[in-house]
Amino acid sequence: MEASSSGGLVQNGRADDDAASGSGENGLRSRKAQLKRSVGGKTKKAKKARMFRPRQPNYTIQQGEDMLLYITNASSQFESLFWTHRSKKVSKAKSLKNQKKKPKPKLEKKPVKEEEEDKFSEHQLESGDSWGQHLPEEVLVNIFQMVVVQDGAVPFLCRVGRVCRLWNAAASTLILWRKVTVGHCWIQPGKNQLEKTTHKIKETVTWLAQNRFSQLRDFSLCHWTKNVDFTLEAVSKFCPHLHSIHLSYCKGLTASGLNSLGLHSRSLRRINLQHSEFQVEGLVEYLEEQGKQIKQMLFTRSHKNDKVLAAITRGCCPDLELLEVNKKLESKDTELSVCFQSLQKACPKLKIFRMLNIQIQHKPIRKRDESEAGFPLLDEFCIANTEYSYMTDQVLLDILFGSTKLRVLDLRGSTRITTSGLAQLPCPKLECLFWGQYFTKNLGFPSVKKNLHLLTEKWGHTLQQLDITNQPFTEADLEVALSFLRQVTDADTLLSLNLSGTRITPRALRPVLERMASLSYLNLSSCRNLPRGVKKIYRSREEICEVLDNLH
């Protein structure tokens, strides 16, 4: 028993030792295997557990200073979250077979404008900058109106109309399109306009006329050398309220465009063709047929355009209120013969007459009758030029003998006019007198002029602007004349005083500056009798008050 027991014990002990030695060997082997895998062998990728991929949540969480903000993005607050399984992988061969079997669906192409609007709205939602889409349309229209008054309708309204649907609706308001100015299409120097570009221009003009110009009143074209007739035809057909046409530095206006204006634009009252080339015969024909409705006419003088003035003098525009004629700077045709007696009969309602840089030669037909009224409604008379003038006291009186309502008289460059001739004019309430000598040729310029006090005594109580630049009055004559301005009861009348190049003295100037409280413009440049530091232009009341300290 002992032996057996001992033998049994011995055997059990050996078995345990063998088991221990076996487990030890297995452990060493497993460790060695792990070392080999970590050093040189490739590790097997662990299988990832299947995970659910959530959809994009309908809310965002932002962290504040002491709290978390929960902000919903969905349109409905009851929309729940859904969880979906991850899509199963499909072999490339199967995917290719499925693509061959299934026809490709046709994608609907969105217009460019809709795509831009969608991208813009998505960007706004992501950035949170969507205030422009929540403003009332009336507020946007008022904002756009302020910009249109300052910068014009085009291209501003065309650009803001592409922002979003709300801005497009506001920019389409017809009230904003009552005054439109269209500039030229830029072309690379040395190249002509392509037919494709011309076609696009015509399409754009037609679309604007049909969809935006139904309440258009004032229309202007600038620097157009082509398609002028086409544009006027489109505008006249679709704009029944057209009131004014302005062509500035344009070419190519023919009888076709003018005939279209005559057929469709019954409300047209103003035509401005200054610095533009047009068919003279077509304009004369238009004035002969439709001149009764024209109240304002402006054009640039040339030998061909003299026919237009002749048509007006014949009586084609009996209701004309404004007539303005100028000349090109490089033109040498400066002299023009005008029969004012015929013009007075043809245009008795004339209120504004302007001829700029033109030497007028008066053509009297006969002596003036007492029954003639002249220009009884004339408000402004301007014959300013920078070279020389044939205007004399008698000619000026023959033109303005019936103009008792005259307020603005511009005689710049008229060297033959005297103070006694001006004092005979029948206008008791003259407000603006421009009599400066801005000359380039010293023709008929007297050495000394006298009696300026006749003008300040007559119009001192109503005169708001006085310009006697380079007039050769003496120091004593200027002092007497300014003394009448100082005696005016209303000290707030005179607003602008130009004494440039005169012989004004500090003694004559100081009392006027102290008296006239509303004087806001003062020109003392090139006044030799004034001290240094004073001879310049002053454009505010504060600057003028500083002059008083330097006058001694």
Image (tube, helix red, strand yellow):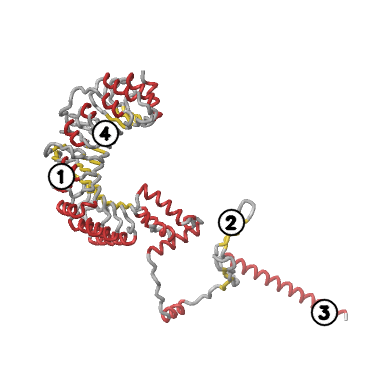
Q: Is residue 24 visible to us here?
A: yes
> Would you say 267 lies left or right of 366 here?
right
Looking at the image, is mark 4 or mark 2 nearer the viewer? 4
- Which numbered mark, 2 or 1, is in the foreground of this view? 1
To which residue does mark 3 refer?
A: 8
**Label 1: which residue?**
302
Q: Is residue 170 left or right of residue 300?
A: right
Q: Residue furthest right?
A: 1
In the image, what residue type sits under mark 3? Answer: Gly
Secondary element under disc 2, as helix, strand or loop, is strand
On screen, residue 29 above or below 465: below
Q: Earlier in the sequence, mark 2 or mark 1?
A: 2
What is the C-alpha distance between the residues marked 3 and 2? 77 Å
Q: Indicate the position of residue 122 as horizontal and vertical percent values.
A: 47, 61
Instruction: Identify the residue under disc 2.
Output: 62
Under tag 3, what secondary structure?
A: helix
Q: Quadrant of residue 336?
A: top left
Query: Callout 1: helix, strand or loop?
Result: loop
Who comes first in sequence, dot 3 or dot 4?
Answer: 3
Residue type highlighted by circle 2: Gln
Mark 2 vs mark 1, CA separation in Å: 74 Å
Q: Which residue is mark 4?
A: 427
Mark 4 in CB contact with mark 2 (< 8 angstroms): no
Task: Determine the image quadrant of residue 404.
Answer: top left
Discs 3/2, front = 2
> What residue do we see at 60% from left, 71% from top?
49
- Separation of marks 3 and 1 at Cα, in angstroms: 143 Å
- Kindly tell me whether residue 221 is visible in this rendering: no
- Earlier residue among tags 3 and 2: 3
Q: Cα distance, mark 3 to mark 4?
A: 153 Å
Question: Pointer 3: residues within 10 angstroms few (<14), some, or many (20+)?
Answer: few
